């Protein structure tokens, strides 16, 4: 039995090591947050009028996450920030918003289904959160023949990534 103990211990620890090796971490104080994402995804940053980060699954244009730090100051609470954003983004006025989480932080979420041609369904899941006076918009995109109708119906990889979201103190 003692001879088997090292092998049993290795079997228990190996899945965690493999998972850690197959993930990457984004952490940037100027963006104000960190998150982990699977290998096989590419990351692009742009700093222009608004800071933006894009994560796209390599070889698949059907999975993408775009984080934008919006150019408007956050309100006294998330509902006030949503009101500000709705003033400038007309599509956000006509969807139902509900409370959710972005990592461990409070967020508001909505699902947008823009009109398309050609039969490919595009669905956007939108998370709005705020931190240190800034409004964060996280957009998850699904390009499928059967678009998800709720935020929970998006592919599980999005939850895997977004549950690791942390604002940097």
Image (spheres, rainbow, N blue to C red):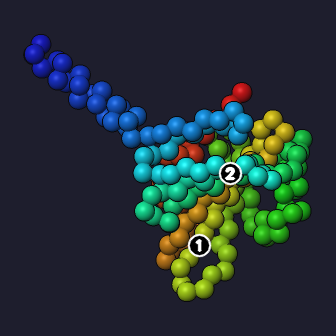
Give the x, y percent position of residue 66: 63, 55
**Is residue 151 shown left or right of residue 106?**
left
**Is residue 162 shown left or right of residue 73?**
left
Extreme bottom residue here?
Answer: 118
Quarter holding residue 125: bottom right
> What residue is rendered at 59% in x and 72% in y?
122
Q: Nearer the viewer, residue 99 or 104?
A: 104
Give the x, y percent position of residue 45: 64, 49
Work out whether mark 2 precedes mark 1 in sequence or the reverse, and give the earlier one.
Answer: 2
Q: Secondary structure at mark 2?
A: strand
Q: How many marks?
A: 2
- Where the N terminus falls, by quadrant? top left
- Check whether the beta carbons of the residues at disc 2 and disc 1 lie within 8 A of each other: no
> What residue is rendered at 48% in x and 39% in y?
24
Q: Is the residue marked by circle 2 packed among few (<14), some (14-19), or many (20+) residues within 10 Å?
A: few
Give the x, y percent position of residue 163: 56, 42
Foreground tag (2 vs 1): 2
> What residue is rendered at 49% in x and 77% in y?
145
Give the x, y percent position of residue 74: 86, 45
Q: Secondary structure at mark 1?
A: strand
Tag 1 residue: 122
Q: Is the residue marked by circle 1 packed among few (<14), some (14-19), or many (20+) residues within 10 Å?
A: some
**Is residue 68 shown left or right of residue 66?**
right
> What residue is rendered at 27% in x and 28% in y?
12
State the separation of the CA atoms marked 2 and 1: 24 Å
Compared to residue 159, the image places residue 131 above or below, namely above
Say the numbered circle drawn on residue 46: 2
Q: Is residue 24 visible?
A: yes
**Is residue 149 shown left or right of residue 16?**
right
């Amino acid at each position: 039995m003692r001879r088997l103990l090292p092998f049993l211990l290795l079997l228990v620890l190996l899945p965690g090591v493999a998972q850690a090796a197959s993930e990457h971490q984004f952490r940037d104080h100027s963006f104000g947050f960190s998150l982990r994402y699977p290998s096989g995804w590419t990351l692009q940053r742009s700093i222009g009028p608004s800071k933006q980060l894009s994560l796209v699954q390599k070889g698949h244009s059907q999975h993408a996450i775009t984080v934008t730090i919006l150019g408007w100051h956050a309100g006294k609470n998330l509902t006030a920030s949503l009101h500000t954003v709705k003033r400038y983004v007309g599509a956000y006025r006509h969807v139902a918003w509900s409370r959710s989480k972005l990592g461990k932080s409070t967020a508001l979420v909505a699902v947008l289904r823009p009109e398309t041609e050609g039969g490919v369904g595009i669905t956007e899941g939108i998370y709005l959160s705020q931190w240190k006076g800034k409004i964060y918009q996280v957009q998850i995109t699904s390009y499928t023949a059967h678009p998800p109708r709720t935020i929970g119906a998006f592919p599980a990889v999005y939850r895997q990534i977004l549950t690791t979201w942390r604002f940097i103190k």
